[in-house]
């Protein structure tokens, strides 16, 4: 087997739901391993999170990580962006400009203008950019697709899907 790809992660540190999910997904087939991270905007949380994951390298900011990893002979092969949505563009910019491949959680950006800016960054960069749509791998989604493809449910005229995350809501009443 060839060497595993070296991944980095931005965001997803202690107290975040999505970081561990992305790590599991990245390492599931044993072809990649998360080795570096800037896992929080708070430097102490970033360091504590990286230590909890036993990462080889921890950074206090994504800017620091992009610069450092691009200069290392064993720097990361790609970075996973698992930050709040408003940070997708600046984080992607930093890594694309450093020549590091990017895997970004959806949504692409917060606005169409930002999406167009990101497109221009990708076109100028030699690095690849991927946007995850992880629900396509869910068993229920695959089953629905098969049922539609096989004509088991007739013509589909409307699809309603919800992904409830009520734990993210603030209580209305205290």
Image: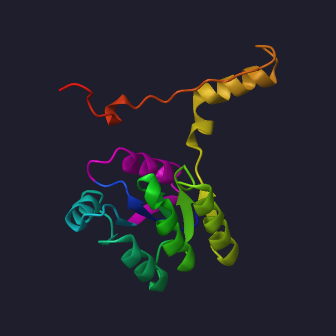
Q: Residue at 62%, 56% (x, y): give it.
A: 112
Q: Is 130 situated above or below 162?
A: below
Residue 15 x %, y %: 26, 48
Nearest the viewer among 25 and 134 is: 134
Location of residue 19 with respect to 46 vertically, above or below: above
Magenta span covers which residues? Answer: 14-35
Examine the image and state in which quarter residue 122 appears: bottom right
Q: Quadrant of the C terminus?
A: top left
Residue 32 is a magenta residue? yes
Question: Where, quadrant-wise, is the N terminus in this rendering?
Answer: bottom right
Residue 53 position within the rendered picture, expressed as x and y whole percent measured from the top left: 30, 57
Left or right: 53 in relation to 65: left
Q: Residue at x 55, y 78 (%)?
A: 97
Q: Residue at x 70, y 72 (%)?
A: 123
Q: Count how many numbered circles sit on residues in the image.
A: 0
Question: Viewed as shown, does residue 114 lie left or right of 6?
Answer: right
Q: Is residue 136 above or below residue 24?
A: above
* Nearest to the observer: residue 47 or residue 121: 121
User: Residue at 28% of width from left, 34% of height from top?
Assistant: 170
Q: Residue furthest left?
A: 174
| Residue 139 coordinates in the image, percent (x, y) | 59, 28
């Amino acid at each position: 087997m060839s060497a595993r790809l070296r991944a980095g992660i931005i965001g997803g540190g202690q107290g975040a739901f999505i970081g561990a999910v992305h790590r599991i997904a990245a390492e599931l087939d044993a072809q990649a391993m998360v080795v570096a991270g800037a896992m929080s905007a708070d430097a102490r949380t970033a360091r504590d999170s990286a230590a909890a994951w036993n990462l080889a390298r921890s950074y206090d900011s994504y800017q620091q990580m992009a610069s450092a990893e691009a200069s290392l002979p064993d720097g990361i092969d790609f970075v996973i962006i698992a930050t709040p949505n408003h940070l997708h563009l600046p984080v992607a910019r930093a890594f694309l400009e450093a020549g590091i491949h990017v895997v970004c959680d959806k949504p692409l950006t917060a606005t169409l203008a930002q999406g167009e800016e990101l497109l221009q960054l990708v076109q100028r960069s030699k690095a690849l950019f991927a946007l995850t749509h992880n629900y396509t791998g869910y068993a229920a989604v695959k089953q629905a697709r098969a049922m539609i493809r096989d004509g088991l449910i007739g013509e589909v005229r409307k699809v309603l899907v919800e992904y409830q995350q009520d734990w993210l809501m603030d209580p209305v009443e205290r």
